[in-house]
Image: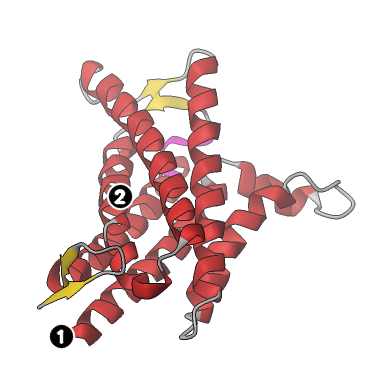
Amino acid sequence: MVRRRASGSRVNSTTIAWCGISAILGAFCWIASSLLEPVVFGTRPYDATVFDVFRLLGWTLMIGGVIGVPATLGDQYERISRIGLGVVASGMVLTAGLHVRAVTVLVSAGFRAVPATGENTLVLIAAYGGYSLVVVGAGLLGIALWREPDRPTITAVLLIFAAVLPVGMLLPYDVLPAALRMPLLQSNNLLVPFEVAWAALGVLVHRRARRRD
């Protein structure tokens, strides 16, 4: 079944539904690999491990989920939605590049874990830049969903929370104790709320696409 989006392009609802599934699978693949890595390799920093392959796979699937968002929003796909999706997509592409780099290092080492030998300033800038774009864009998408007449409250709140949480890391220690702050700052845990929110968005994309059939 084909629908015309507010922007004027034609999108197949089955394709949109698969975009939602892609976002869900990608988010959980990324979460699982990021949480399992410190269990297997400890807290020592690594330039590349086998888990980077699964993070790249998960992130690529999540990028596929971006395609279904405009059609899901329909007539509500307006300025704030376009900006939010553009910011998220830019951050995802930048972060995907980092995952590609890590997998390249892993392959070059014969699929053996490569310990970090020092901080790479360019990689750090790209990482923080990509993550910042992703969470800011998620917050904007959350606001856009919150303003919908048929508001998906849980998805909107999760997206906004994913954007607000990193700001909380700037709070003084008497407001946000180290016991709560440190687990979030370890590894990629700070992005886990975004991954959960993106999975929820994937569910929304899939559900609305199936409703059109």
Q: Mark 2 points at which residue?
A: 63
The residue mark sitting in front, 2 or 1, is 1
Q: Which residue is drawn at 41% across and 61% down?
A: 198
Disc 1, SS: loop
Q: Identify the main secondary structure in magenta.
A: helix
Q: Quick one: 36 or 133, which is closer to the camera? A: 133
Residue range in magenta is: 39-43
Q: Mark 1 points at which residue?
A: 213
Residue 170: x, y in percent?
A: 77, 44
Q: To which quarter of the image does residue 73 belong? A: bottom left
Q: Give amino acid for label 1.
A: Asp
Q: In this view, does 196 lie above or below 134?
A: below
Q: Quick one: 49 or 20, which is closer to the camera? A: 20
Viewport quadrant of the C terminus: bottom left
Q: Is residue 88 above or below residue 140?
A: above
Q: Going by the image, does 27 lie left or right of 18?
A: right
Viewport quadrant of the N terminus: bottom left
* Magenta stretch: includes residue 42: yes
Q: Residue at x 25, y 45 (%)?
A: 57
Q: Residue furthest left?
A: 1
Residue 183: x, y in percent?
A: 63, 49
